[in-house]
Amino acid sequence: MTMPRLAPLALLFLPALAAAQAPVPDRLSGEQRLALHCGAVFAIAARAPQAAPGQAARGREFFVRTAARIMDETGMTREEIRAAAMADAATTLAALPPEPARAPALARQIDGCLPLLDTVVPPLDAGRSP
């Protein structure tokens, strides 16, 4: 059964469940919204049972760089960025289908975000860490 495995992940998002109903601030461009969405997808994927450690580290670095850039570009606070990302993660997590379709659906989301990940945090050479 999938729910016990997802329950700890859902607990991480409890503070954002109320915020999940709030829209992402209008001052975000389409590219910024996509970047935050991809950061949320990488966070969800990092906690999945089949997560690749290297990709999880790159996903974290992606989010750090993306959040900093969006704060610089928009003047949003760290808390606003965090709330927007957590709201997106909660929405994304809720939209994923139950197993056995969950893992392939998450993989499709990841695949859609990989080009952006590669642009922001290029793949590492063997032996290097982020």
Image: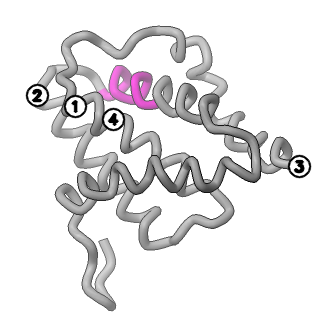
- Of all residues, the one furthest to the left in this rendering is 73
Residue 26: x %, y % from top left: 25, 10
The residue to which callout 3 is attached is 1
Q: Residues within 10 Å of mark 4 (few under 14, many from 20)?
A: many
Q: Nearer the viewer, residue 25 or 108?
A: 108
What is the secondary structure assignment of the residue under circle 4? helix
Spatial distance from mark 4 to mark 2, Cα to Cα? 13 Å
Contact between marks 4 and 1 (CB within 8 A): the answer is yes
The residue to which callout 1 is attached is 32
Q: Amino acid at mark 4?
A: Leu
Q: Amino acid at mark 1?
A: Gln
- Pair 1/3: label in front: 3
Residue 45: x %, y % from top left: 54, 53
The quadrant in which the C terminus is found is: bottom left
Spatial distance from mark 1 to mark 3, Cα to Cα? 35 Å
- Pair 4/3: label in front: 3
Q: Residues within 10 Å of mark 1 (few under 14, many from 20)?
A: some
The disc placed on residue 36 is 4
